[in-house]
């Protein structure tokens, strides 16, 4: 079974401070990991995916297979980063094929 | 205007009644999904469909039913058998179920059952 855990339900930082949203996963095969974001009054949307190795809006996330983690990081948080963030895992085989499993979500608040 | 739409935005029903939530997309996507969003529990997959006339149960399918008669439509029926139906429901679609394809989400429907 595949599982995604986001240990922090709420995370508060001040503008300009570094931020790290934690994500750990459980999956026996080679997963595909994503971060989705939901800004206030907007739809849930893809922020980044691990296979792209890209930086979006200053955010990066590295897949660490040894620690089964995919933490989202940004060196200098901005107020507009305040949102709900979901980590998600896409299985690639067996009964997990194609399913996207989401974590519980972390609400990030960036204070001025 | 392309995208994925859900209607209505808010829905109220009496306990014991079935209710159907609409989801339509004009993105020509093959795959469609229904999720339920509850505080502290994230998004949980109810049903998904990879192609027309085919669908699979997700993690919490009990008390729900779906149909996929057209590529662009994937309605969800919340039946009276669903023990805790009050929630925010999200529909999504993607190009296909294989590969790391992005899922596009609708605006959601908030269902309240009293």
Image (cartoon, rainbow, N blue to C red):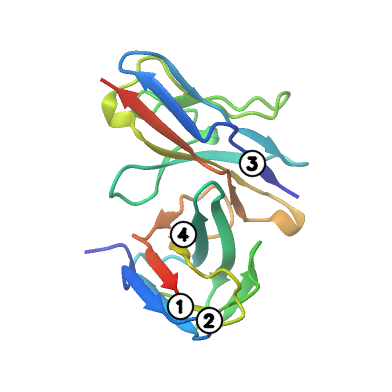
Q: CA distance from mark 4 to mark 3?
A: 23 Å
Q: Residue at x 34, y 52 (%)?
A: A43
Q: Residue at x 41, y 80 (%)?
A: B13
The quadrant in which residue A40 appears is top left
Left or right of residue A82, residue A7 in this image: right
The residue mark sitting in front, 1 or 4, is 1
The location of residue A22, given as percent across then percent down, is 56, 28
* Label whose residue precedes the other's in the sequence (1 or 2): 2
Name the residue carrying label 3. Answer: A4
For the residues beneath circles 1 and 2, the answer to whether they share a chain is yes
The quadrant in which residue A39 appears is top left
Q: State which chain disc 3 sits on.
A: A
Q: Residues within 10 Å of mark 1 (few under 14, many from 20)?
A: some
The location of residue A92, given as percent across then percent down, is 68, 49
Name the residue carrying label 2. Answer: B67
* Label whose residue precedes the other's in the sequence (1 or 4): 1
Q: State which chain disc 2 sits on.
A: B
Q: Residues within 10 Å of mark 2 (few under 14, many from 20)?
A: some
Q: CA distance from mark 1 to mark 4?
A: 18 Å
- Which one is in front, B6 or B111? B111
Q: State which chain disc 1 sits on.
A: B
Q: Residues within 10 Å of mark 4 (few under 14, many from 20)?
A: some
> Is disc 3 placed on a helix, strand or loop?
strand
Name the residue carrying label 1. Answer: B75
């Amino acid at each position: 079974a595949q599982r995604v855990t986001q240990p922090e339900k709420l995370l508060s930082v001040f503008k300009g401070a570094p931020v790290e949203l934690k994500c750990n996963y459980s999956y026996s095969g080679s997963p595909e990991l994503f971060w989705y974001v939901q800004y206030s009054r907007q739809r849930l949307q893809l922020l980044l995916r691990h296979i792209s190795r890209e930086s979006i809006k200053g955010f990066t996330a590295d897949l660490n297979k040894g620690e089964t983690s995919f933490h989202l990081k940004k060196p200098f948080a901005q107020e507009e980063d305040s949102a709900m963030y979901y980590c998600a895992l896409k299985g690639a085989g067996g009964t997990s094929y194609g399913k996207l499993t989401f974590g519980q979500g972390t609400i990030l608040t960036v204070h001025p | 205007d392309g995208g994925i739409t859900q209607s209505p935005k808010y829905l109220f029903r009496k306990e014991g009644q079935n209710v159907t939530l609409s989801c339509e997309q004009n993105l020509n996507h093959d795959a469609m999904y229904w999720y339920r969003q509850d505080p502290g529990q994230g998004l949980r997959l109810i049903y998904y469909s990879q192609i027309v006339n085919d669908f699979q149960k997700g993690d919490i399918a009990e008390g729900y039913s779906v149909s996929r008669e057209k590529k662009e439509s994937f309605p969800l029926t919340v039946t009276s058998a669903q023990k805790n139906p009050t929630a925010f429901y999200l529909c999504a679609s993607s190009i296909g179920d294989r590969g790391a394809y992005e899922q596009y989400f609708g605006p959601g429907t908030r269902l309240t059952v009293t």
